Image (tube, rainbow, N blue to C red):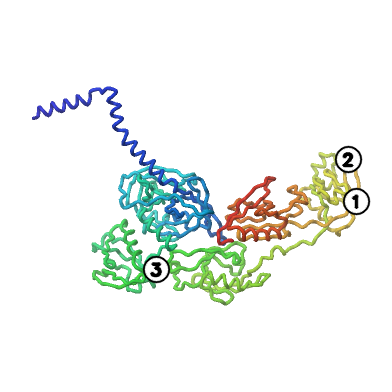
Amino acid sequence: MFKCSCRLIIMLLFVLLWPLPPSSFAAAEDIAKPSVDTQQQAVEAAIARVKPALVRIHVVSATYYRGREEKVESYGSGVIISEDGYVVTNHHVAGNARYISCTMADREEIDAELVGTDPQTDIAVIRLCPDKPKRFPFALFGDSSKVKVGDNVLAMGSPLAFSQSVTRGVVSNTELTMSDIFNEMLELDGEDVGSIVVWIAHDADIYGGNSGGPLVNLEGKIIGINEISVGLGGAIPGNLASEIADKLISAGRVRRSWLGIGVQPLLKNSTEKRGVLISDVMQGSPAHKAGVQAGDILVKLGEQPVDVRFREEMPAFNRCVAALEIGKEIEMALIRQGKELSLSVTAEERPSAVEKVREQKIWGICVCDITPMRARRIGRSSLSGVLVKSVRTGSPCDNAKPSLEADDIIVSIAGKPVAAIDELTDITEELLKDETEQIPVLVEFERKESNYLTVLKIGPDDSRDQGLEVVKAWIPAGIQVLTADMAFALGLEGKRGARIVQVYSGSSAEKAGLRVGDIVVALDGQPIEATRQEDLEVLPTMVRQYRIGSAVELTVLRNAGEIKIQMKLPAAPKPAREMDRYRCENYDFSVRDIAFMDRIKEGWSEKQTGVIAEAVDDGGWASLGGLSSGDLIYAVGGYVINDVAGFERIMQQVMAESSRTIIVQVERKRQNIYLELQAAKNQK
């Protein structure tokens, strides 16, 4: 037997080591090739199924900083999941959007609207809003519970806001949880995403902009929604994403139950071998009302046994609590100081973790309502009042004595209680009804444990009408000082005065014969004592002492000779700060009429019409559309702009005609540019 075995081994080695003819190698290649081709064909087929449903999402969201709402542009990915245009993406991509548009696989751009969002799972749903009804290509969800470590997957999306792309990898972990050091990074709108989500980890490359894109198996089905990249990529399981998307589409939000308890895994030295440790009980919560105490160990919730010994088991428990029927009484089996007891608790709907912030432009503050979570953090029993998040420098609230600060709580205005933002808005409108000037208002606010009163002024900003200059006489020409060095170089050593650098076309100075290069050395025989750059206002100041229309004599040096020029002094034109203005709140910019010096500076004739964009708010809708301070706006929506009054009238008309986009024609640095200015729907 041993000899036979040795002989067999020798024969096998002989066969294996004997050189094979070329035809044999070809045969081996043919045998291996079909498996590679088959996998490649599967990849290509999967891409073909999903790629038409990919969208690149352009989002304009709002941030609130220093008392102002600022708009921010960002990009992400999404996937169409129905032929009527519902798209799944991440909450952190579109959940706080003020404007959304999507670029399709065929490069068509379509506006979209936010249907609903859920920060706790980082899932949002948007809906495509084409100009004409159409059917969209869409992808299907697969069963993410069947995903196994080692499965081939495709991460699809628009990394770095580029066009749609695909990366390939394998599943590394089907139950990825995050350690405590990542908690802050994974917090969205006050919600800990890791408290609910257990990710599918994979090594397919994902980059910024891939967020919201699908993780796809080789059957071409969605098994996850890509969310994070921490060395490995992390995708929200498709089953969870599909469940949340269905709820958002049907109800616009996700309702979860809430007991008001904080929990953690059993301590390592705990004598109990089952349950979850209740570490905190919120005052006034369902658990507090039921008699639950911190330190209790929950071992059973209804008919569901509870066993949380490791952090990785927390998300499953949290999902169990969230799924309880709201308003229904349920039994809790607890262990307290080694003894078992049973308590009945009625789950309530889980409140929002954080409040929505809104800008109050008249007051110059950003504010929010007070949620139960916020009230607990600041140790306040009442939810009544409006919390100040930030204050704009120079605003009424900033100028008040004492001024308002972040974290103050406004509790009354003009003696009327303020329970929420809507009441603040209503009271403000009532106070300012028919008012044409600023009015003083008494405001009561809380700051930590103290109660303050302050008086501030709100109402129409009349700063444009303050400090108007009395119209004075002037010489309509540009000047520079004849410095000592310049006089020496020109052979005019010892001379003083002002050199003419520009004579304004059609002016009395031009008609009187004043020329560029003339040096004015005296006005009605009085010397012009100007020898330094700092003396630029010497001649204008002398001229302003005369009445408008006065006849004066200028002593002028020209071509080494001295001549006398007689002219009448006209009225100085209005400066830019005194021109009529209009503030377009919907698009966050203001304009003014063209001033005389604007025409001089830009070389515009008297026939040039339009308005000048004077202040374009950083992070505002106009700024996002490309409008810049100093732009000359000469047409809006095809209508020619003559002045501020016409601009205001045309803007109101165009905004009424348009959904939220207006076409603005501007001149910038001698170039004509078309701009598309967009605003949120509620900004119409």
Residue nearer the viewer, 673 or 408: 673
* Quarter-of-image position of residue 69: bottom right
Element at badge 2?
loop
Residue 4 in the image, given as x and y percentages of width and height:
10, 28
Residue at the far bottom: name it.
415
In space, the residues marked 1 and 3 are separated at their CA atoms by: 86 Å
* Type of amino acid under label 1: Gln
Q: Name the residue under label 1.
A: 566
Residue at the far left: name it.
1
Residue 575 in the image, given as x and y percentages of width and height:
75, 57
Q: Is residue 620 visible?
A: no
At horizontal 19% and vertical 26% (from top left) the residue drawn is 13
**Mark 3 or 2, nearer chain start:** 3
Q: In this view, does 560 lie above or below 292?
A: above
Q: Name the residue under label 2.
A: 560
* Type of amino acid under label 2: Ala
Task: Say which of marks 1 and 3 sits in front.
Answer: 3
Residue nearer the viewer, 51 or 18: 51
Crowding around mark 3 (Cα neighbors within 10 Å: few <14, some 14 to 19, many 20+) is: some
Element at badge 3?
strand
Q: Mark 3 points at which residue?
A: 349
At horizontal 45% and vertical 69% (from top left) the residue drawn is 375
In space, the residues marked 3 and 2 are separated at their CA atoms by: 92 Å
Q: Is residue 281 above or below residue 126?
A: below
**Mark 1 or 3, nearer chain start:** 3
